[in-house]
Every structure is written in C-alpha cells, then in structure tokens.
Amino acid sequence: MSRAFIILLAVLFAASILMTGCTAVRPEAENGKLNVYITTYPLYDFTMKIAGDRINATQIIPTGVDAHEFEPSPKLMADLERSDVFIFNGGGLEAWAERVEDSLNRKGVIVVNTGKGIAKDNDPHIWLSPIRAKQQAERIYDALIKADPGNADYYTKNFKLLEAKFDDLDKKYRDTLSKATSRNIITTHAAFAYLCEDYGLNQVPITGVSPGSEPSPRRMAEIIKFIKENNIKYVFFEPLTSPKLADSIARETGIEKLVLDPVEGLTEEQKARNDDYFSIMERNLMSLKKALVE
C-alpha cells in the first residue's frame, strides 16, 4: 500500500469525524417512531390528538413551572439535538427555544414555532383562542407529515377530527358570548387578550403577561375603582397559581370569584377526570357565561 494512499485514507477518516461532530447523530427511535419534544401542555395535547401512538412524545415544561422562567438543562439540549421534531409555542413564552431554533434546524431537527406570525405584542397566550389554537395545530400537523410521510393518512384523519373540535368550540363561544350583557372580565394575569379580541370581550388584568408579576398598590386601586364603576360581579382566578390577588379584590369589593383556566397544565383533579384542552375550555365558557350572560 503506497504512502500516498495511506495519507488519503487518514484525511478521509478525519473528515468523517469532523462531519460527525457537526451533525448530531439521530438514534433509531424505539419501534421506528418519531422522537417529538413539545414545550407546553396545550401543544402536547394537540400533538397527541394528531399523532397518537405513532410517535414518542415528551412534554418538556412540567405542570406548575412558569414557562416564561424555564431554562433547559444540558441533557435536554442534547436530547433536542437528537430529536426528529421540536414544537414550541413562541411569542416570547420560551425565549430559550427561539435562541436555539436555527441551531437545531442546522442539525436536521424539524422545528415548529407554532406562534410565528400569530402572536403579537409579546403575548404568547394564543392557544386560549380556539381560532388561533387551530392554526397552531395545523402547523404541528404539517411538521408531522414532513417528518413522517408514511403515516400521512393517519395524521390527516386525526387532524380533520381535531379541526372539527376546534370549529365546534369556536361556535359555542360565539353563540354564548353573543348574548353577553357585559363585556368586561377581571383576570389575575393578562392571559386572555386573544380570546377577548376574537369574541368581543374586554380583559382588565390585575397583572401583566407573566403570572409571577405583582401589581402595584396603584394598579390594585384602579382595578377596585373599575369594578365599582362598571358593576362587575366576578373576578377570575387560575387553578395553578395563588388566588391571593383575587381573594384581595373580592374582599375589597364584595364580588365573587370564578375559575378561568389558562390551560397551562393539568391539576391532579383534572388528570383524575381525564380532562384535556377542550374540556377545560368548555368549563371556561361556562364561567364566562355565568359572569357575563346570566
């Protein structure tokens, strides 16, 4: 074997090592299924309704953890680099995901920013409008088809069923809220702007987009004044966060409290009832009906 040939083999071997270092090795998924990572509960629910048991799905952000504050571990980043599909909400909810989007794309991961072009004003809560949640689900469906065309018929059948559920939910919201005698809702944080925009309501939040923020005394006084001047009868609170702000407002004004769930995760009680996005949104509508229609 000539020296020149040996040198050529060494160069080719070195080049192959470098190429391997630049591209994450995507392991063979269990049973040949896609490895799909999803940041939040609503997107996980939509994904599972489309893909069912045809994928290995992982919800990244646990229930009870503020998605605004979550940061990925090195292990999670390594897992994402070896995944097939990465789905996130966007709109500023997972800043870390937006930072790594280009890098994951270069490694061959199909990345789905479900809120791109839908979210605005740095408000990520688009899933709380059935109309916009359907758009998010469609982007998930498109990504699954791209990643796994062999199961396209299965995904398409399930997505059509999911589309119909969104359309039915949208109709229920429109029909019910068209009868509202009041349009103002007092919420503990500003999660419901898209829902209010799409169904003609006016959100008056105690705090901002992040549920962890605290209102100033001036803001609390403004809310109390608004309630008294507009004959508001209910303040809405959320099941996964402290009700202390709603409690304070209720004590100061004599109004009652109702749950309006931002569907950021499932409580143990909701898990026991086998709740999902749609059942929670139906109960949200019943709360809105009680506050605004009855």
Image (cartoon, rainbow, N blue to C red):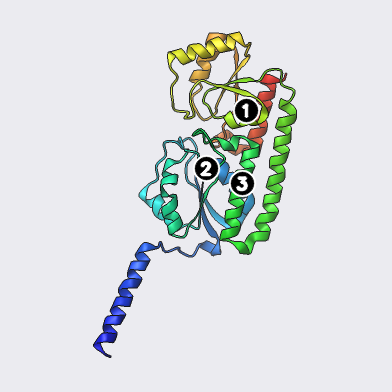
Quadrant placement of the N terminus: bottom left
Residue shown at the point (62%, 35%) measured from the top left: 129
Picture quadrant where residue 175 is located: top right
Which residue is labeled 2 in the image?
89
Which residue is labeled 3 in the image?
137
Q: Is residue 178 visible?
A: yes
On residue 157, the disc is: none
**Marks 1/3: CA distance?**
20 Å
Identify which amino acid the numbered label 2 is placed on.
Asn
Residue shown at the point (60%, 27%) measured from the top left: 260
Picture quadrant where residue 176 is located: top right
Which is more N-terminal, label 3 or label 1? 3
Instruction: Give the secondary structure at mark 2.
Output: loop
Quadrant placement of the C terminus: top right
Which residue is labeled 1 in the image?
196
Q: Is residue 260 left or right of residue 179?
A: left
Q: Is residue 111 above or below residue 212?
A: below
- Which mark is in front, 1 or 3? 1
Identify which amino acid the numbered label 3 is placed on.
Ala
